[in-house]
Amino acid sequence: MEGNAHVYQNNHINTDEIIPARYLNCDQEAELAGHAMEDIDVDFLKKVKTGDFIVSGDDFGCGSSREHAVWALRGAGIRAVIANSFARIFYRNCINNGFPAIECPGAAQAIRDGDRLEIDLAAGQIVNLSQNQTVQFRPLPDFAREMIAAGGLMAQIKKELK
Amino acid sequence: MGATITEKILAVHSAREKVTPGDLVNCEIDTIMCHDVTTTPAIDMLEKYGIKDVCDPERIVIMPDHFVPNKDIKSAEMVAKIRRWAKAQNIRQFFDLGRHGVCHALLPEQGFVTPGKTIICGDSHTCTHGALGAFSTGVGSTDLAATLATGKLWFKVPESQRFIVSGHLPEGVYAKDIILQIIGQIGVDGALYKAMEFCGEVIDELSVEGRMTICNMAIEAGGKSGVINPDAKTLEYVRTRTDTKFTVYRSDADAQYAQTFEINVSDLEPVVAFPHLPGNVKPVRLAAGIPVDQAYLGSCTNGRIEDLRVAAQILKGRVVAVGTRMIVVPATTEIWKQANREGLLDIFMAAGATVSTPTCGACLGGHMGILAAGERCISSTNRNFVGRMGSPKSEVYLASPATVAASAMAGKIADPRQYL
């Protein structure tokens, strides 16, 4: 995976900020994507290209359990979120959707906005092509990687139900 | 080595003799609660993957609450879809308009929460139900769909934190002040991934409703669940609501905790959480005098009868300040009726407040009291994030129902103790 980093150094970016509740009368990814992050960064959609990454501080995705937050980011083109740490339900929602949530303490401080990154999920490695640096992260647990490889929790369950 | 209540419940529900924090378990779920916002995507997923039948209709309870009564065409379509699905799946336990309420107030009120149960819902405040000694946690729509299909869900067994609340709760200080104080102390990620177990003489003395307020906000500290060991009050609450059998689990004296916090509340003052995090907690005197455009009394945190009684006690014979709007939202239909019987609704209306039908409403910026840019609200709800109740340029201060009522009258944030 290779893309540009969009860095939000703030801690506790919550799901109300990722996708405000006024849009939750819809669950279509494309429509939600049109409002991703709008309450904290009105230019977000102008900046993001398909395949890019969000890099953020502690406790990313805290608050409401709305999975719409994952869909809005994915719909906007975001391929993975890298954060110092994640809130629990958001993290589950990412894994269940086969969407990588990469826990990498210090990432929000080391990575600059606009840096070009290459991520190797299995190796647990972020190569910062702009800064010519390599950062290791703890690879996702096996069960999570299996779930992402299977295409998410529902795909896995469908297989088990057969 | 002993086990915590959380470990015991998770072990029994995953057919193991014991579990240890960090274990990955596939857990039987006793009650699956569904509301309007997160259930429609789950129904879509079941359809997409060709899963025709739910695991067991009797385990499912449907309680649309967020945009209820339907606020627009899209939200009406969501609930219409859930109604069609529920009918096709033979789900009897459906609390439609007229029996409706905020799901986390309605579920225990209607007897669906018993000690020892496992409960999930596609809503972060599902941690509320640990107040009755259940393991109850919020999940997303995929988790919900998976559980609807299989009756099971994966969990990592959490470490537990113990909060021993001691002392004597002063007059004018309530369960809401205690939990805000704890979140202020440990931070909004101070309990990340952990089960928050509350105990001590103050918790023992709290009503079951007050305990629900405490557990409800475990998620605001990042917790996976909040839980309180059942006692005689718990059993009385449950037995007046249901005949179903249940097993009571309690933490062993030698259970292991990741941390233990001791909080003495004898000197606690009423507190408020300043914008834009529930952890920005300060004594109300440091906020006193900040003008408010709106005062909101309701939600799964503080919309129960006890909350309405406290607010009515303060507002009786007084009026809401000119320039301030007060919205009262009883959390369930039964609470609304009870408040009406007790004359509380008359007190609110006489004071110049307005009373709404039960709904999550403006708590999450849905409808029925949205804030404009530059407006400020004192609220008995649970979150004060940017844009939570409306415009991203509005502000929310979180407080107890008493502080909300006192502030409504004063037109500015006020210490409730002067009006008691």
Image: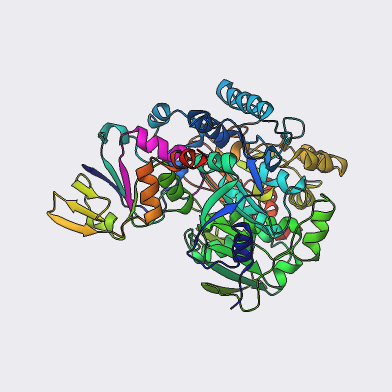
* Left or right: A50 as drawn, with respect to A140: left
Given the current orientation, which residue lies at the most extreme front position? A162
Name the residue nearer the viewer: A148 or A38.
Answer: A148
**Nearer the observer, B406 or B260:** B260
Farthest right residue? Answer: B341
Q: Residue B25's x, y, as percent? A: 52, 57
Q: How many marks?
A: 0
Left or right relative to B269: residue B234: right
Quarter of the image holding residue B18?
A: bottom right
Residue A66 in view (yes/no): no
- Vertical side of B274 occupied by B2: above or below: below
Q: Horizontal and vertical percent for residue B267?
A: 65, 72
Check residue B189 for magenta coloring: no
- In the image, what residue occupies the spot 74% across and 68% down? B204
Name the colour scheme: rainbow
Q: Position of residue B113 (x, y in %)?
A: 72, 51
> Please, is residue B136 above or below residue B73 in the view?
below
> Closest to the observer: B313 or A79?
A79
Q: Which residues are magenta?
A: A63-83
Quarter holding the N terminus of chain B is: bottom right
Q: Position of residue B243 (x, y in %)?
A: 83, 51
Q: Quadrant of residue B131?
A: bottom right
Nearest the camera: B345 or B261?
Answer: B261
The C terminus of chain B lies in quadrant: bottom right
Which residue is farthest top? B73
- Quarter location, residue B123: top right
Task: Please report the residue visible at 41 percent of the width from the left and 36 percent of the height from the top.
Answer: A71
Q: Is residue A77 magenta?
A: yes
Horizontal side of residue B56 vs A24, given as left or right = right
